[in-house]
Image (cartoon, rainbow, N blue to C red):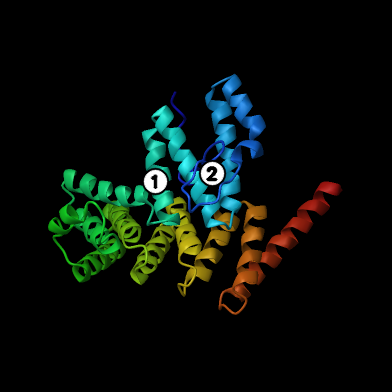
Amino acid sequence: MMIRRLGWYSFIILFAFTACKTSDDQPTFDLGKRYETLIKNYYAEKSVQNLNALLQAIGQDYRNSEDEKEKEALLLEALRWTQEDDQREYQALFKKELTKVNPYHNLSESYVFDKAVDARTDKKQNLASIYFDGYARTYPNGKFYGEASTNISMDTSQVVDYVKSLAREAVAAPDSIRISAMMRCKEASEAYAISHPKDTMSAVFLFNTAQLLRENGNTGEALELFDWIYNYYKSYSNAPKALFMKAFIMDQVLKKPKVAEGLYKKMIQQFPKDDFVDDAEFMLKNLQTEGQKSNSSTNK
């Protein structure tokens, strides 16, 4: 059964299904009871609509959760479900998210190595070296360490310089090739962050690429990276700005005022001393004023 393709950001809400089987060091989240009705509906009629309704409901809870163990449990169950239905496109997305939530899970380790092998197969040698270098650094006792270490064509400092060079090329690229240059920069920045999760340069690369994408109208891709930064690099100096940019895109580009209002408030509450608080307060006030005008017009 094929599910419709995911949009630029909708994949973030598609996380999966019934009660979780976890390892001994993980708490168990009784997802089955939480979504009992949706699960019954799906088994009564195994349709795309029923499956998506279930996934979207759980995905909404995933997005709202501040508990990383719960997020991990949802993702692991999603992966179990995709294996049963052979949803390979979804498997890749869920593994990517799992690697962000818990880069030291065995599935995350395999994901990083698989990405390296895929890049090598596609003859993207520099991209492959980013993944192989990251694997060797992140998983020094990993089962693929030997193969990864022998396939590194650039050391870490060279990898960093390479990713920086892609950003410079994207900025300087003429209009005719700017999109492809930005996508190469995004691909390399994501590869670095996925395979070097605890490296401070990961957040820097993600943020700079997100800004580049936003400035050139690629707001969907930018929003994904801002979300990545805020969720997993909260100690990074630009994490508050990443949250502000999420709110700004929701407000000014996607025209989702309720979502934007919540994000502005979160930014103000979580980072009260940040330089962007004044901007967030200003944008929030504008939103609330527009909301009052709209309500007043509706009631006339």
According to the picture, the residue beneath numbered tag 1 turns out to be 95
Instruction: Provide the secondary structure element on which disc 1 rests.
Output: helix
Q: Give the left or right position of residue 166, taking residue 76 as reference.
A: left
Sequence-first tag of 1 and 2: 2
Q: Which residue is drawn at 65% across and 54% down?
A: 257
Q: On the image, which quarter does residue 2 sit in?
A: top left
According to the picture, the residue beneath numbered tag 2 turns out to be 13
Q: Which amino acid does label 1 sit on?
A: Lys
Q: Nearer the viewer, residue 262 or 220?
A: 262
Task: Determine if residue 32 is in view.
Answer: yes
Q: Distance between the residues labelled 1 and 2?
A: 14 Å
**Residue at the far top in the pictured view:** 45
Q: Where is residue 222 in the image (x, y as percent from the top left)?
A: 44, 56
Q: Give the left or right position of residue 80, taking residue 157 as reference.
A: right
Q: On the image, which quarter does residue 38 sit in?
A: top right
Neighbours of disc 1 within 10 Å: few (<14), some (14-19), many (20+)? many
Neighbours of disc 2 within 10 Å: few (<14), some (14-19), many (20+)? some
Q: Residue at x 36, y 47 (%)?
A: 107
Is 222 located above or below residue 43 in the figure? below
Q: Give the left or right position of residue 127, taking residue 249 as reference.
A: left
